[in-house]
């Protein structure tokens, strides 16, 4: 009955109810339905109003005041919800304004596919191979390592077809791959969860002040492609398969994302990061970020 009364009191045509209860018109909710409300003015009504004033809630608040507070309640974090700030997110979602959307779907309908491989499928296959491959074996015989992972179930037949083996051969023959192979510890697909202040995400939002988001945090999750130890510190490496003209495009596109990865390694894993790099399989080269 209480919720039904709350609905009626908020109707645009229920001014007589709000007047009787002493409520503000600010609580009105929009409605396309026209409703006629009638209330006989009599002595019992005055008695009911007195009862509202005299009846107290368990914490000592007059019942009338309690009802008014409930009806006029405003969500205190509405400004954050309007800015689309969520309490938990992926790093890629936080940095999407700095990135260009690579893919819309991970696969296409069979009538469009016709044996071709999408950029999304190729990128997924490349990352899967780099996650599970034995790097020394891949350097020695890439095709044999691909076959081994397929037999082990790490790569599907479609993944094997989608792999750009020429690009992988160039990578494993590069001086950068030699640095990875010389490392005593190589980390791959390292998952992390990081808490960051909301103020970092709303610094350029003119509608939100630092005081609005004081002591507010967002939990972000991500996966680090690769990190390897070198000279007592770690080199953070992110693989990209984007079709770009220059390495500088990748740096501008993913700098914000990699800053979170670097922070996660230092804060969550206690690892000093001496260098952060992007390796482009499309350009067969890497760039420091």
Image (tube, helix red, strand yellow):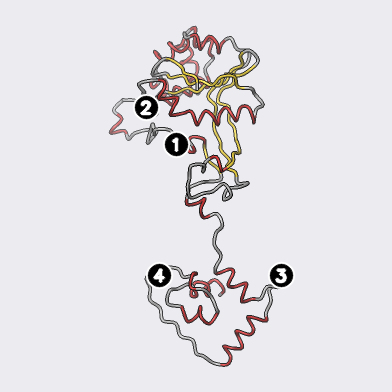
Q: Which tag, 4 or 1, sits closer to the chain's start?
A: 4
Q: Residues within 10 Å of mark 3 (few under 14, many from 20)?
A: few
Tell me where residue 213 appears, x and y as whole percent. Answer: 58, 48
Q: Which tag is nearer the camera, tag 2 or tag 4?
A: 4
Q: Which residue is mark 4?
A: 31
Tell me how far mark 3 sits from mark 2, CA to CA: 62 Å
Mark sitting earlier along the chain (2/4): 4
Q: Nearer the viewer, residue 119 or 51?
A: 51
**Apparent side of residue 57 relative to residue 49 in the rendered image (left or right):** right
Check residue 59 in the rendering and tell me which mark sits there, or answer none.
Answer: 3
| Among the two numbered marks 3 and 2 on one chain, the one whose residue lies closer to the N terminus | 3
Q: Is residue 100 above or below residue 161?
A: below
Q: Earlier in the sequence, mark 2 or mark 1?
A: 1
Image x and y of residue 116, in percent: 31, 25
Give the percent coordinates (x, y) of residue 112. Answer: 28, 32
Pointer 2 with pointer 1, Cβ within 8 A = no
- Classify the position of the N terminus by image quarter: bottom right
Residue position marked by numbered label 1 in the rendering? 96
Task: Give the residue furthest to the right.
Answer: 59
Element under disc 4: loop
């Amino acid at each position: 009955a209480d919720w039904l009364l709350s609905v009626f009191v908020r109707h645009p045509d229920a001014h007589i109810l709000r007047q009787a209860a002493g409520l503000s018109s600010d609580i009105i909710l929009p409605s396309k339905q026209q409703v006629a409300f009638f209330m006989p003015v009599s002595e019992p009504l005055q008695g009911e109003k007195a009862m509202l004033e005299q009846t107290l809630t368990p914490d000592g608040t007059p019942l009338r005041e309690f009802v008014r507070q409930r009806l006029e309640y405003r969500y205190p974090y509405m400004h954050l919800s309007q800015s689309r700030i969520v309490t938990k997110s992926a790093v890629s979602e936080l940095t999407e304004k700095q990135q260009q959307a690579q893919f819309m779907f991970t696969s296409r309908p069979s009538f469009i596919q016709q044996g071709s491989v999408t950029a999304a499928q190729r990128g997924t296959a490349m990352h899967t191979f780099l996650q599970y491959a034995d790097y020394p074996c891949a350097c020695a015989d890439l095709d044999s390592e691909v076959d081994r992972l397929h037999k082990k179930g790490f790569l599907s037949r479609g993944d094997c077809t989608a792999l750009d083996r020429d690009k992988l051969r160039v990578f494993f023959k590069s001086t950068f791959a030699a640095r990875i192979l010389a490392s005593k510890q190589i980390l791959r697909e390292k998952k992390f969860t990081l808490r960051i202040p909301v103020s970092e995400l709303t610094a350029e939002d003119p509608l939100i002040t630092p005081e609005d988001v004081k002591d507010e945090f967002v939990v972000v999750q991500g996966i680090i492609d690769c990190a390897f130890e070198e000279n007592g510190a770690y080199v953070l490496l992110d693989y990209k398969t984007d079709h770009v003209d220059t390495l500088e495009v990748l740096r501008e596109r993913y700098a914000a994302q990699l800053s979170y990865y670097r922070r996660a390694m230092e804060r969550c894993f206690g690892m000093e990061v001496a260098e952060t790099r992007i390796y482009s399989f499309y350009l067969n080269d890497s760039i420091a970020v």
